[in-house]
Image (spheres, coloured by chain):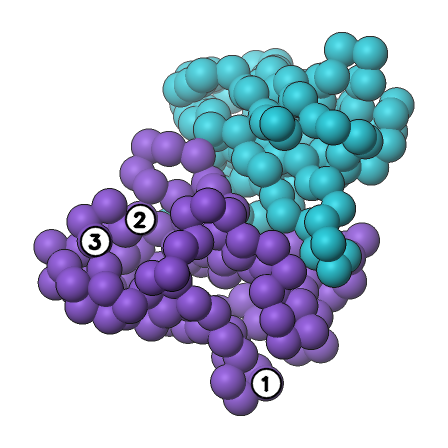
Chain colours: A cyan, B purple
C-alpha cells in the first residue's frame, strides 16, 4: 500500500543549527509529495511540495527534493529559528476516483528550537 | 488569506451520543475532506467529497459516519453513536481544484466520555 515513513522525533536544536528531517515513501505510481507544518494550537499548513521526480520544493528557507531513486523527500533548512518550532508532517497524494486526492501522512516530527 | 473554519474547537460528548462537526470551506473550493488524528498517532484520511457525493472513504468511515453539505456552504461530519475510540482531533480540508493544495482548518478536538 501507499505509506510515508519519517524520522522519529522529537528533534531539539539550537538556533541557527542545520535541520534535516528524513522522509521516505512507498507508493504505487507517481505520487506528489508534501511537507505540512503544524504550529501549536493550529491546523496543518502546507510548507512546500513537489509533483515529480527531481523537483525541489522550497518555502521560508526550507527545501526538499523529490528523489525517485531513493523514494525520499527529506526536509532541510540551513539555519533554524525559534519560530520554526512545530510538528512537521511528510505526506503524499495519489489521484483517486473523481479527481480528489487524499493525503497519506507520516507520523510527524516535533521540532523544538532553543534560543 | 482565505481560511477554512471549523466549529466547535472542542466538543465533549457522552458515549453513544450523536455529534456533528462543522466546516466552512474556502469560497469556490470544490473538493472537501475529513481527516482525524488520534493523540500521538498519524493524521488519517476519513472521506473525500466532490460534486455532492463521496469520492472515497477509508475503512474507518463506517456506517456510523456520514458527511453532507446541506446548504451549499457548510460541510459537516456526523457521527451517529460515538464510541470512546472516536476521541481524536478532526480536521477538515478543502481544495480548489484537484491539482491545488489542500487547505486545513484548525481542527475540532472531540472527547468522548
Q: Chain of mark 3?
A: B
Apparent side of residue A11 relative to residue A94 in the rendered image (left or right): left
- Chain bearing tag 1 is B
Q: Which residue is mark 1?
A: B72
- Do dots 1 and 2 share one subunit? yes
- Disc 3 target residue: B83
Q: Judge whether residue A80 can be spotted in this image.
A: yes
Quarter of the picture holding the C terminus of chain A: top left
Q: Nearer the viewer, mark 1 or mark 3?
A: 3
The picture places residue B109, in percent across and down from the top left corner, at 30, 55
Question: What is the C-alpha distance between the residues marked 1 and 3?
Answer: 29 Å
Disc number placed over residue B88 in the picture, else none? 2
Where residue A108 sits in the image (x, y, percent)?
48, 29
Is A93 positioned to the left or the right of B21 in the image?
right
Q: Quadrant of residue A4?
A: top right
- Under circle 1, the secondary element is loop
Residue B105 vertical placement versus A61 (above, below): below
Q: Who's the residue at 74% across and 60% down the image? A: A98
- Callout 2 crowding tier (Cα within 10 Å): few <14, some 14–19, many ≥20: many
Name the residue rendered at 87%, 25% in the picture: A53
Q: Secondary structure at mark 3?
A: loop
Which of labels 3 and 2 is toward the front? 3
How far separated are the C-alphas under marks 3 and 2? Answer: 11 Å
> Which element is circle 2 on?
strand
Return the x and y of residue B56 as percentages of the image width and height.
60, 55
Q: Residue lying furthest front in this view?
A: B63
**Do residues under tags 3 and 2 come within 8 Å of each other at their CB atoms?**
no
Amino acid at each position: 500500500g501507499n505509506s510515508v515513513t519519517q524520522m522519529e522525533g522529537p528533534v531539539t536544536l539550537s538556533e541557527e543549527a542545520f535541520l534535516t528531517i528524513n522522509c521516505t515513501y512507498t507508493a504505487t505510481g507517481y505520487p506528489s509529495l508534501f511537507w505540512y507544518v503544524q504550529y501549536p494550537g493550529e491546523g496543518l499548513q502546507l510548507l512546500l511540495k513537489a509533483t515529480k521526480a527531481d523537483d525541489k520544493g522550497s518555502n521560508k528557507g526550507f527545501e526538499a527534493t523529490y528523489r525517485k531513486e531513493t523514494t525520499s523527500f527529506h526536509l532541510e533548512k540551513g539555519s533554524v529559528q525559534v519560530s520554526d518550532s512545530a510538528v512537521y508532517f511528510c505526506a503524499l497524494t495519489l489521484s483517486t476516483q473523481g479527481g480528489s486526492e487524499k493525503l497519506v501522512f507520516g507520523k510527524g516530527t516535533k521540532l523544538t528550537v532553543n534560543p | 488569506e482565505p481560511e477554512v473554519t471549523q466549529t466547535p474547537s472542542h466538543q465533549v460528548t457522552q458515549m453513544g451520543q450523536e455529534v456533528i462537526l462543522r466546516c466552512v470551506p474556502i469560497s469556490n473550493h470544490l473538493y472537501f475532506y475529513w481527516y482525524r488524528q488520534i493523540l500521538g498517532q498519524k493524521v488519517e484520511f476519513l472521506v473525500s467529497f466532490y460534486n455532492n457525493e463521496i469520492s472515497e472513504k477509508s475503512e474507518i468511515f463506517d456506517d456510523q459516519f456520514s458527511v453532507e453539505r446541506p446548504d451549499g456552504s457548510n460541510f459537516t461530519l456526523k457521527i451517529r453513536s460515538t464510541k470512546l475510540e472516536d476521541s481524536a482531533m478532526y480536521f477538515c480540508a478543502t481544495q480548489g481544484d484537484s491539482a491545488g493544495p489542500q487547505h486545513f482548518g484548525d481542527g475540532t478536538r472531540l472527547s468522548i466520555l
